[in-house]
Image (spheres, rainbow, N blue to C red):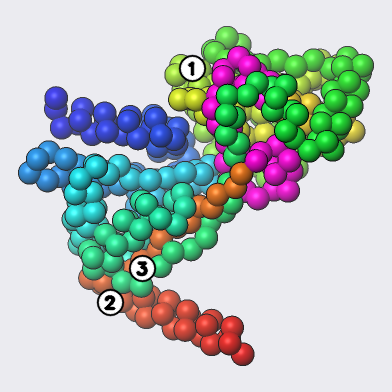
């Protein structure tokens, strides 16, 4: 196997742990969702046995920063680390990055939990000579382990308020002539994505900053079998839209919106119930993941919460990096003193 093939195989294996670590997800981010001046970099280090650590990054020399390869779409990031010797390989990788004269700051996020990979990364970064290494909170993540239940079982476990609302709103939506559709493949994909974008533009969400990303992701997801694109329509017009991605037993609730002028029918709630029914009874998923954010409504649909954190550090090989590390230490000290007052 060639070196490039081995690295791709390692990335693909990581993608089975979370869809956003898949090499094609990372490629879609690289092609459609980087800001001006950003460039993807896959930082690698190997040992004599051929094991490799891979750190997907984006570099912005104008800002003197290296960040995890991702953006606000990204809700889970992690390097590829072999079972043995991962810490030492990561240390070598970050020591190499420190030689870049233009990189002063490093940020790695979002990382699941405060142990495991996060602890190994923090130690490797510090051992590689990066200073002021510290953790910071990113967001809460709501999810639900299905324990093999079907949709009926799932609903019985939800709060009565949600069950009653879902039943009442679904009946109201159907009586108004509403319809629901779930697209799983490339059939009529362009038209469905156009409807999705129209709903998104008429919603409360901020304008889409990367116009090519959703069409690119939808095409990839249809090709890989991940795509679950749901549409709720009233009088022939899409009033709610959701893009879910289903892979390796997990349903990722990725992007959703509804038209504000249709809010009286709660089409988003109705569509969520419809898509959960399909995910549980048709796809048989074992986990449902609401991705980033502590929105209050998520705790009714999900049953558990975990936290994602990040790591920040400053290049000890550069005067600017050492200065930023000292400034961070000073701010932390002053904050602690303020907390004691």
Can see residue 194? Answer: no
Residue 193 x/y as whole percent: 62, 22
Earlier residue among tags 2 and 3: 3
Can see residue 47? Answer: yes
Residue 92 x/y as whole percent: 18, 55
Image quadrant containing the C terminus: bottom right
Q: Is residue 269 magenta?
A: no
Of badges 2 and 3, nearer the viewer stands 3
Q: Name the residue located 50 percent from the left edge and 52 percent from the top edge.
A: 308
Q: Is residue 276 magenta?
A: yes
Q: Is residue 259 above or below residue 53?
A: above
Crowd class of label 2 (few under 14; some 14 to 19; many from 20; radius 10 Å): few
Crowd class of label 1 (few under 14; some 14 to 19; many from 20; radius 10 Å): some
Q: Nearer the viewer, residue 314 or 117?
A: 117
Q: Nearer the viewer, residue 336 or 244?
A: 336
Residue, disc 2: 319
Residue 262 x/y as whole percent: 85, 31
Residue, disc 1: 225
Magenta stretch? 274-303
Q: Name the residue located 50 percent from the left edge and 25 percent from the top edge.
A: 249
């Amino acid at each position: 196997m060639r070196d490039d093939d081995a690295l791709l195989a390692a990335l693909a294996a990581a993608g089975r742990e979370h869809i956003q670590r898949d090499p094609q997800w990372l490629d879609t981010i690289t092609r459609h969702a980087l800001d001006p001046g950003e460039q993807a970099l896959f930082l690698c280090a190997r040992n004599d046995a051929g094991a490799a650590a891979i750190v997907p990054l984006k570099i912005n020399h104008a800002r003197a920063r290296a960040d995890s390869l991702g953006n606000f779409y990204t809700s889970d990031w992690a390097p590829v680390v072999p079972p043995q010797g991962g810490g030492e390989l990561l240390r070598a990788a970050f020591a190499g990055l420190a030689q870049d004269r233009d990189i002063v700051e490093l940020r790695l996020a979002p990382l699941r939990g405060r142990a495991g990979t996060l602890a190994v990364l923090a130690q490797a970064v510090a051992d590689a000579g990066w200073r002021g290494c510290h953790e910071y909170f990113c967001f809460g993540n709501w999810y639900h382990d299905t324990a093999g239940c079907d949709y009926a079982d799932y609903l019985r476990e939800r709060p009565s308020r949600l069950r009653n609302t879902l039943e009442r709103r679904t009946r109201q939506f159907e009586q108004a002539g509403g319809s629901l559709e779930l697209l799983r493949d490339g059939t009529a994909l362009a038209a469905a994505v156009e409807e999705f974008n129209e709903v998104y533009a008429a919603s409360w969400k901020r304008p889409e900053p990367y116009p090519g990303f959703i069409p690119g992701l939808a095409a990839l997801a249809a090709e890989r079998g991940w795509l679950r694109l749901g549409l709720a329509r009233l009088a022939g017009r899409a009033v709610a839209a959701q893009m879910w991605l289903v892979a390796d037993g997990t349903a990722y609730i990725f992007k959703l919106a509804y038209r504000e002028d249709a809010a009286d029918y709660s089409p988003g709630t109705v569509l969520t119930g419809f898509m959960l029914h399909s995910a549980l009874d048709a796809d048989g998923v074992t986990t449902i993941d609401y991705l980033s954010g502590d929105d209050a409504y998520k705790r009714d649909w999900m049953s558990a919460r975990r936290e994602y954190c990040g790591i920040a550090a400053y290049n000890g090989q550069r005067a600017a990096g050492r200065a930023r590390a000292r400034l961070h230490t000073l701010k932390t000290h002053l904050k602690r003193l303020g907390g004691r007052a």
